[in-house]
Amino acid sequence: MDPNAGGTDRTARVVLGVLALLSSVAVVVYGGGLPGDLQLVAAGATLVFAAVMFVTVGVRRCPVNALRGRNPCHGRE
């Protein structure tokens, strides 16, 4: 499979993944004024988002770019 996530995309995904990971930790530690069950859901959702960001960085493939037909790596090796 050819990569379809360029350098800028990958950098943005790493930054978003780290921010989501930190947000998840903050929700668990500080609660954010949410009840216990909602804290768990919010923390889990942000962890899933972070995992998706890190996986797409690692495999250099983005399903959204593929669906849109966007390939910032076109013409590069």
Image (cartoon, helix red, strand yellow):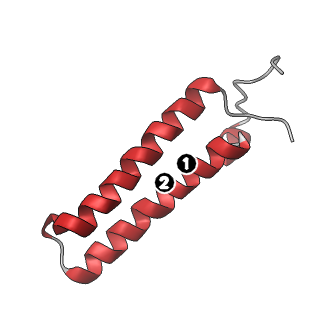
Amino acid residing under circle 2: Ala
Give the image location of residue 34, x and y in percent.
18, 72
Q: SS class of the residue under badge 1?
A: helix
Give the image location of residue 28, x and y in percent.
27, 68
CA distance for labels 2 and 1: 5 Å
Amino acid residing under circle 1: Met
Horizontally, residue 19 falls left or right of residue 37, namely: right
Q: Is residue 29 above or below residue 20?
A: below
Q: Residue under label 1, please give it.
A: 53
Q: Are marks 2 and 1 in contact (CB under 8 Å)?
A: yes
Q: Residue under label 2, please give it.
A: 50
Quadrant of the image occupied by residue 7? top right
Horizontally, residue 53 falls left or right of residue 28, namely: right
Horizontally, residue 31 falls left or right of residue 1, namely: left
Residue 75 - label: none
Residue at left offset 35%, top offset 67%: 43
**If the image is split into quadrants, where does the N terminus sit?**
top right
Horizontally, residue 44 falls left or right of residue 12, namely: left
Residue 49 visible in this rendered orientation of the protein: yes
Q: SS class of the residue under badge 2?
A: helix
